[in-house]
Image (spheres, helix red, strand yellow):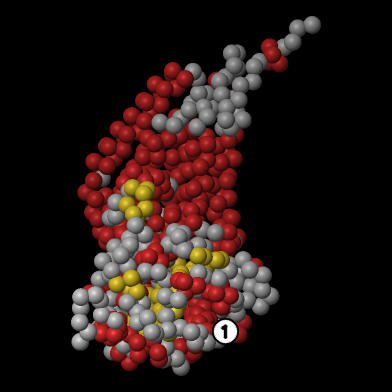
Amino acid sequence: MSVPVAHRMPLLLDAGGAHAVPPAGTSPRAFAHPGWIILAASFWLATAANLPLWLALRELALFERSGGWLFAVSFGLIIAASLACVVSVLAWRWTLKPVLALLLVASSFGAHFMLAYHVVIDSAMLTNALQTNPREVRDLLGPRFFASVGLLGVLPCVALWRWRVDYGRWQRRAVHNFLQAGAALLALVVLVLASFSPLASTMRNHKELRYLVNPLNAVYALGKLAGRPLQRSDVLQPLGLDARVAWPPSARPPLLVLVLGETGRSGNFGLNGYGRDTTPELARRDVASFRNAWSCGTSTAASVPCMFSNLGRTGFDARKHDTEGLLDVVQHAGMAVLWVDNQSGCKGVCDRVSSVSTANLADPQLCPGGECYDGIMLEGLDERMAALPPERRARGVVIVLHQMGSHGPAYHQRSPAAFKRFVPECTGNDLQACSGEALVNAYDNSIAYTDHFLSGTIAWLGKQHAYETAMVYVADHGESLGENNLYLHGMPYVLAPDVQKRVPWITWTSAAFAQRRGVTSACLRGEADRPVSHDNYFHSVLGLLAVQGSVYRRSLDVYASCATSPTDEVAGTAAMLARLDPKPGKRAD
């Protein structure tokens, strides 16, 4: 008995589980040429997945201008041709569908976040995404997220994977890939030349649009990140090996707490003239606040390594190799350093110092639901400090407390119930669904808790009688709360609004520390409106600690105008000792 031909047909599968080569005798209409699937995916990505771009063009009233719709059609075709050109090179049996699926899913993620928070996708934002921890991811998820990803990413991927493709032999596939890429490139060149004038004008006047072209923005950002190791040496360069502490040996050693704030808007601090009293506890402390302070970046990943560097924002971005930072210099000076983290890590700043994370500790009051309030960092801090090397503690101690602060979008989770003074409060992560008042209330409540935390840190320092103590609080970046329909942070620095770059900078010194260094709150308050930035942070901390060396620049030390020379008392002590015990061949005065 013979078996029907159809039952004897070989079944060849591609990477997506579909027929790769039509067996002899089958209808060719059941299979598609790879070019058609590339065109379909490219047009889907250029249209539906670029909804944020089209909405931005509408808000700019570009559609209302003469030829506006023609420009939009040309722009969409340019995006589709660019995608087709890139994907055609990868149109092989084992790569085409996985690459297109990755682009579809990535574009659905990008479209959601650009629509929900009006952020843009660049290398800094991609770095933030790659460094996001599970807690932060949870805050960003919600029904709208799953709907966007499902409609723009998952459903097209299902259709893609069910689409049967005829790849043919590899020799023919190579020729076809070359021809497809060439045709797409030719179309791209023709389209750009045909619409060059309006395209160049639009991109020059509205630079933010280039970060909305989805998913080419993510592809470009990923390529830029991948190329950084080629642009920069991976050998860490030492810094400040000649650092020394010019602190009088007869005095109690310094203890400085650096509170690294998260997502702090300078304008929302009552100390800085905000209409709400968000900082009542700090107002009762003898603190000074710089009201005109600016960040190094608009994200934690950009700002934190930069502010702990000696290079400043411009130099840090242009660096050819990585170097040690502020905490390394402090250690080279012989002092003890401890990093306590209640966030997503120190971004490499604390890699060579003692560090501990409090983010996942179990405390029924300070860590409800598995996420800890910043107050947890003060618990057990005495024991952590006591565990540092005693010979270093004798020279001085620097403790960095890295806050969760006001990290969004779940601002309501950053403050306990006792600090929710401003109601109603936005309790969701779909910020556009909240009223402006409720959103600001949730954020201001997080600032009120930061006020309490900083006051508690000062109280803790007041109990450290073996040291002369001080505290400096500086936030890493600011935040958008719906102004100009922008939310969160991470915009490219040149495009970011001031609220994402203007940060609080608050200083407290004990009476003994102020007397020793001359850095009094009264003197600092006279400098309250002086422009300062993260570029000053490295040198200001060293100056406050009286750490001297070749890397310290007094001109960038914001405390230098109030401080006494750190070597005055040391020099006086040395002279007295020299008179009592002169060197051989010298005569005592």
Query: How far across and how far down the image is residue 343, in percent?
Result: 52, 66
Q: Nearer the viewer, residue 297 or 397?
A: 397
Q: Is residue 102 above or below residue 355?
A: above
Split into 4 quadrants, where in the image is the C terminus? bottom left
Q: Residue at x 45, y 71 (%)?
A: 392
The residue most toward the front is 585
Q: Is residue 460 above or below residue 381?
A: below
In this rendering, does residue 144 appear at all? no
Query: How far across and how far down the image is residue 510, in percent?
Result: 42, 88
Left/right placement of residue 151 relative to residue 187 reads: right
Q: Nearer the viewer, residue 137 or 92?
A: 137
Q: Is residue 373 above or below residue 230?
A: below
Query: How far across and how far down the image is residue 52, in percent?
Result: 43, 56
Split into 4 quadrants, where in the image is the N terminus? top right
In this rendering, does residue 230 appear at all? yes
Query: How far across and how far down the image is residue 334, in percent?
Result: 40, 69
The residue most toward the right is 1
Total label count?
A: 1
Left/right placement of residue 300 relative to residue 157 reads: left
In which quarter of the view is residue 248 placed?
A: bottom left
Q: Residue at x 44, y 79 (%)?
A: 255
Which residue bears the numbered disc 1?
Answer: 419
Q: Is residue 203 above or below residue 8?
A: below
Q: Residue at x 59, y 55 (%)?
A: 146
Give the crowd class for mark 1: few <14, some 14-19, many >=20 residues within 10 Å: some
Q: Residue at x 48, y 28 (%)?
A: 92
Residue type at numbered disc 1: Phe
What is the secondary structure assignment of the residue under circle 1?
helix
